[in-house]
Image (cartoon, rainbow, N blue to C red):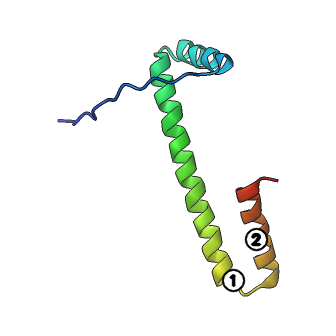
Amino acid sequence: MAVTEKSVRQSVTLPARVARRVKSLAKTSSTSANRIIVELIESGIEARQQEKKRFIELADRLARSRDPNEQARLKEELAVMTFGE
């Protein structure tokens, strides 16, 4: 028997354009706007976790690298991840 996770009611104010997109996604997928918001939040959290993991992997590679060219490339990649382009 599956255990269901307790839900917590949370009030969120969305910009109008985001709310319209959420409603549109809900309509096209025949689900509720609430379910779409939950899915988007879960996807965003997962994406952030993956980004953090990738950053740590690059930092570890940089620390282990002895090749100046690879070090420069890894530093650039880490800078772009941290500060953008």
In this picture, is 71 found above or below 55?
A: below
The answer for how far apart the CA atoms under marks 1 and 2 are is: 11 Å
In this picture, is 51 found above or below 1?
A: below
Q: Viewed as shown, does residue 38 lie left or right of 54?
A: left
Residue that appears at 80% across and 83% down: 68
Question: x, y (%) of residue 35?
Answer: 45, 23
Q: Quick one: quadrant of the N terminus? A: top left
* Amino acid at circle 1: Ser
Residue that appears at 77% across and 58% down: 80
Determine which quarter of the picture holds residue 17: top right
List the residue tagged with mark 2.
Answer: 75
Dots 1, 2 in contact, CB < 8 A: no
Residue that appears at 59% across and 68% down: 57
Q: Viewed as shown, does residue 21 lie left or right of 84?
A: left
Residue that appears at 76% across and 78% down: 71
Q: Nearer the viewer, residue 59 or 24?
A: 59
Report crowding for label 1: few under 14, some 14 to 19, many 20 or more residues within 10 A (C-alpha).
few
Q: Nearer the viewer, residue 67 or 20?
A: 20
Q: Secondary structure at mark 2?
A: helix
Report crowding for label 2: few under 14, some 14 to 19, many 20 or more residues within 10 A (C-alpha).
some
* Residue with the most extreme left position: 1
